[in-house]
Image: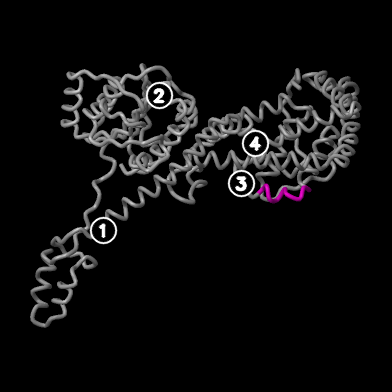
C-alpha cells in the first residue's frame, strides 16, 4: 500500500551505533529497492525496520535492545525478534555479514517478504487489516512540527494503536510462523542468487577471488547491477553465461601461459636453471671447467629456449557483433561472452571496443576493460534488430584502430548472415590491416563464409557461442 506521507525514520530496536545508522542511510539513498519497500510498506515504521533488518544481517554481533520507551517501535521489535530467533538466521548471515551489497539486497527481499506476508494476513484477518489501516491513517495525520497539543492528540493515539497492532502481530506470528519462515527462506535464496550473479557479471577471471574483485568496484555500481539482476530474468541469464564463459576464458589464458614456458629449442645465455645437461657436465670436468666458466660469464653457454608469447596489451580488442533479427536468440549468450572478453581486457590492461551492428551501429569503448554498473546494464539491454551491413562495423574497427596509439589489434567479427561489400572498400580495409598490423578472427554462426573470407585471417564455423570454436576468441 502506498503511503501518502513519508517521514525519515532512523530509530532502532537493535544495538546500532552512529556508524551503522550513517552507513545504512548512505545505502538507502543509493538503493531504489529499499526506497520502494519503504514507500509501499504496510507498517508506518518500515524505514526504521529496514535499517534494523540491514544491521542484523551486516553487524558482527547484532542484538535486540531491552524494551524501548518508544512504544511506536513495538511492532518492529516483535518482527525483528521473530527474524533473529529463526533457526536459519545465523546461516543466512554467512552470506551477508560485513557485506554491504548482500545485506542491502537481503534487506530489500526481507522487506518485500514482510509486506507480502502482512498482505496475506490482512486478507485472512479483518481485525489485523483494520489495525494496520488505523496506524497508517494516524501516521499520515502527524504534524510536521511536534507541539504539546499534538503530543496529547495524534501521537498518543498512534502509540496506543501501535501497541494494539503489536499484540495482534505477536498472536499472528505465533499462529502462522511456518509461512513466515518459508518466506524468509525464499528471500535468502533469492539474495544468494543475486550475489552469485553479481560475481559472474562484475568479477574478474581469477578463480576464488570474486569477492575481492567486487571490493574494487564502487558500491553504487554493485547496488545498481544487483537491483537489476534481482528484477530482470534477462540479467540473470546473462550472468549465468558470463560465469560459464569466464571459467572457459580463465582455462584458455592459463593454458596459454603454460605453453609459453615450454622448451622449444636451444639458444645461448647464462640462466642457470635453463642450461643444457651437457653444459652442466662440462662444469664438473677438471679440464673443461674453466672454459665453461668463461662462456657462462659471457652469456655464451647453451640453454633451452623458452619462447614466450608476444607481449600482451599491444592494442585494443575490437568485438564486432551482428545484432540483426536472426541473432536475437543468442543475445544473452553474446552479452555473457562480451563480459568474459572484458575480464581478459581488464587483466591485460587493454581497451575493448564493442561494435554492435545491423543496418545501424552502436559503439561502446571500455578503457582497460573497465565497465561501470550503468554501462553494464545498458549493454545488456541493447539490441538493434533489423538487417545486416558488414561495412559499418569494419569502418568502425578501422576508426578505432586509427585512433589507438598502438598498431596491433585483435578484431573478432561475429555474424550469422551475409552481405555484399564493395571491392574498393575491401581493398581499403586490407591495406589498413597491413599498415596497422591487425588481424581478424571471424566466428561464423552457420556455414556460409563467402562474404567474410575477403577480410578475415581466420574463420571458424560455430553453432553458437558455447562451443570450442568460439572459445578461440579467449586465446587473444
Q: Is residue 216 left or right of residue 280?
A: right
**SS assignment at label 4:** helix
Residue named by callout 3: 98
Which x, y percent locates residue 70?
Answer: 84, 35
Which quarter of the rendering shows the C terminus?
A: top left
Where are the magenta residues, as a range? 85-93
Q: Earlier in the sequence, mark 2 or mark 4?
A: 4
Residue named by callout 2: 323
Mark 4 and mark 3: span between their CA atoms? 12 Å
Neighbor class of circle 3 (other Cα within 10 Å; few <14, some 14-19, many 20+) is: some
Which quarter of the rendering shows the N terminus?
A: top right
Which x, y percent locates residue 165?
Answer: 88, 31
Neighbor class of circle 1 (other Cα within 10 Å; few <14, some 14-19, many 20+) is: few
Q: Residue at horizontal 16%, vertical 27%?
A: 431
396 up-or-down from 291: above or below: above
In the foreground, 344 or 373: 344
Answer yes or no: do the residues labelled 2 and 3 have beta carbons within 8 Å?
Answer: no
Residue named by callout 1: 262
- Point out the frontmost of discs 1 and 4: 1
Which x, y percent locates residue 451?
Answer: 26, 25
Q: Residue at horizontal 91%, vertical 29%?
A: 160
Answer yes or no: do the residues labelled 1 and 4 have beta carbons within 8 Å?
Answer: no
Residue named by callout 4: 24
Amino acid at each position: 500500500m502506498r503511503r501518502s506521507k513519508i517521514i525519515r525514520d532512523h530509530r532502532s530496536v537493535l544495538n546500532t551505533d552512529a556508524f551503522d545508522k550513517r552507513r545504512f542511510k548512505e545505502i538507502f539513498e543509493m538503493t531504489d529497492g529499499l526506497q520502494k519497500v519503504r514507500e509501499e510498506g504496510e507498517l508506518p515504521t518500515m524505514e526504521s525496520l529496514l535499517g534494523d533488518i540491514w544491521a542484523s544481517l551486516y553487524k558482527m554481533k547484532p542484538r535486540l535492545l531491552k524494551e524501548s520507551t518508544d512504544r511506536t517501535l513495538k511492532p518492529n521489535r516483535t518482527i525483528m525478534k521473530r527474524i533473529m530467533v529463526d533457526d536459519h538466521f545465523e546461516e543466512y548471515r554467512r552470506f551477508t555479514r560485513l557485506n554491504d551489497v548482500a545485506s542491502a539486497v537481503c534487506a530489500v527481499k526481507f522487506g518485500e517478504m514482510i509486506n507480502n506476508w502482512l498482505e496475506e494476513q490482512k486478507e485472512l484477518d479483518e481485525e489485523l487489516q483494520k489495525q494496520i489501516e488505523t496506524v497508517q491513517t494516524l501516521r499520515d495525520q502527524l504534524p510536521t512540527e511536534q507541539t504539546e497539543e499534538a503530543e496529547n492528540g495524534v501521537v498518543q493515539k498512534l502509540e496506543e494503536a501501535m501497541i494494539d497492532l503489536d499484540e495482534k502481530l505477536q498472536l499472528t506470528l505465533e499462529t502462522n510462523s511456518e509461512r513466515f519462515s518459508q518466506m524468509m527462506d525464499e528471500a535468502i535464496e533469492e539474495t544468494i542468487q543475486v550475489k552469485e550473479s553479481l560475481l559472474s557479471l562484475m568479477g574478474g577471471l581469477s578463480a576464488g577471488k570474486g569477492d575481492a574483485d567486487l571490493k574494487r568496484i564502487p558500491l553504487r555500481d554493485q547496488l545498481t547491477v544487483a537491483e537489476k539482476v534481482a528484477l530482470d530474468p534477462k540479467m540473470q541469464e546473462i550472468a549465468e553465461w558470463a560465469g560459464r564463459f569466464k571459467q572457459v576464458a580463465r582455462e584458455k589464458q592459463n593454458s596459454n601461459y603454460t605453453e609459453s614456458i615450454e622448451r622449444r629449442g636451444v639458444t645461448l645465455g647464462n640462466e642457470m636453471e635453463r642450461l643444457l645437461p651437457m653444459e652442466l657436465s662440462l662444469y664438473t670436468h677438471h679440464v673443461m671447467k674453466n672454459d665453461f666458466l668463461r662462456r657462462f660469464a659471457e652469456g655464451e653457454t647453451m640453454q633451452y629456449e623458452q619462447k614466450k608469447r608476444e607481449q600482451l596489451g599491444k592494442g585494443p580488442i575490437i568485438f564486432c557483433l551482428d545484432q540483426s533479427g536472426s541473432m536475437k536468440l543468442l543475445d544473452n549468450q553474446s552479452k555473457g561472452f562480451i563480459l568474459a572478453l572484458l575480464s581478459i581486457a581488464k587483466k591485460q590492461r587493454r581497451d575493448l571496443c564493442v561494435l554492435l551492428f545491423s543496418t545501424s551501429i552502436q559503439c561502446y569503448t571500455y578503457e582497460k576493460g573497465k565497465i561501470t554498473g550503468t554501462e553494464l546494464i545498458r549493454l545488456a539491454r541493447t539490441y538493434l534488430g533489423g538487417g545486416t551491413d558488414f561495412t559499418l562495423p569494419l569502418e568502425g574497427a578501422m576508426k578505432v584502430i586509427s585512433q589507438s596509439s598502438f598498431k596491433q589489434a585483435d578484431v573478432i567479427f561475429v555474424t550469422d548472415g551475409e552481405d555484399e561489400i564493395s571491392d574498393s572498400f575491401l581493398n581499403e580495409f586490407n591495406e589498413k590491416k597491413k599498415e596497422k598490423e591487425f588481424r581478424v578472427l571471424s566466428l561464423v554462426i552457420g556455414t556460409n563464409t563467402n562474404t567474410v573470407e575477403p577480410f578475415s585471417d581466420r574463420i571458424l564455423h560455430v553453432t553458437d557461442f558455447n562451443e570450442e570454436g568460439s572459445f578461440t576468441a579467449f586465446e587473444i
